[in-house]
Image (cartoon, helix red, strand yellow):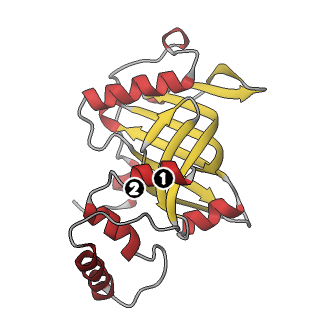
Amino acid sequence: MQVTNEFLQNLRQDYKSASLNESDVDQDPIVQFQKWFQDAVDAQVYEPNVMTLATADKAGRPDARIVLLKGVDANGFRFFTNYLSAKGKELKRNPFAALVFFWPDLERQVRIEGTVEKLDKETSEEYFNTRPLDSQIGAVASPQSQVIPNRVFLEEKFEELKAKSAGKGIAKPAHWGGYIVKPTRIEFWQGRSSRLHDRINFEKVKGTWTKTRLAP
């Protein structure tokens, strides 16, 4: 079938698997997120920790990409990357971000907004040392977001570093580490029939979470 505008306009799914009532949602949105994340794990959702990370440059122009959640607790949501990448540079200039999780098998979405801070060196090293050796080497070999001449350049750098590592772990480079998104807003979205979706929104006001329902 040819993908035309008419095809796209008629491409839709009616969501009927569940509902979301205010009384069913924990008063702490982090606890509620952990419950939903566990549901996604139990449902064997493919890579449930995949999330869209949206940032903006100093001019306010948005940018977005997929990263992996590597920790969540009362303080916020953690991920790791190259500090010299495009997202790293944007977060340095404008330390605010938005995250989106979408679990289509459960017809659920979570949207998060907040401030962003670097994790301390010790925390980043602790995580880096748990990564497979090839992933460690890849973090060093790749000048993320920079122009490279070709694929061979990257592969040769990788093999060079791998030979030097002699099968052992390597040190975390200074330009690589973690961030934590400290949420100020978290929205839970449950798909419903006829596009009358459930949206329960949390806003942090003076250190306290307030819960409201939003129109779909």
In the image: residue 16, left or right of residue 63: left
> Of helix, strand and loop, which one carries label 1?
helix
Residue 199 visible? The answer is no
**Which mark, residue 124?**
1
Image: 131 above or below 213:
below
Q: How many neighbours does mark 1 have within 10 angstroms: few (below 14), some (14-19), or many (20 or more)?
A: some
| Image spot of residue 178 (x, y percent) | 51, 53
Which residue appears at 59% of the width and 44% of the height?
181
x and y percent of residue 16 in the render? 34, 23
Query: Badge 2 is on which residue?
Result: 128
Is residue 107 visible in the rendered structure shown here?
yes
Name the quadrant of the N terminus. Answer: bottom left
- In this picture, is 200 found above or below 177? above
The vertical placement of 173 against 45, above or below, is below
The residue positioned 37% from the left and 31% from the top of the image is 107
Mark 2: few/some/many CA within 10 Å (<14, 14-19, 20+): many
Which quadrant would the C terminus be assigned to in this image?
Answer: top right
User: Which mark is on residue 108?
Assistant: none
The residue furthest bottom is: 149
Name the kind of residue labelled 1 in the image.
Answer: Ser
In screen coordinates, is 184 left or right of 139? Answer: right
Q: Position of residue 123 (x, y in %)?
A: 49, 48
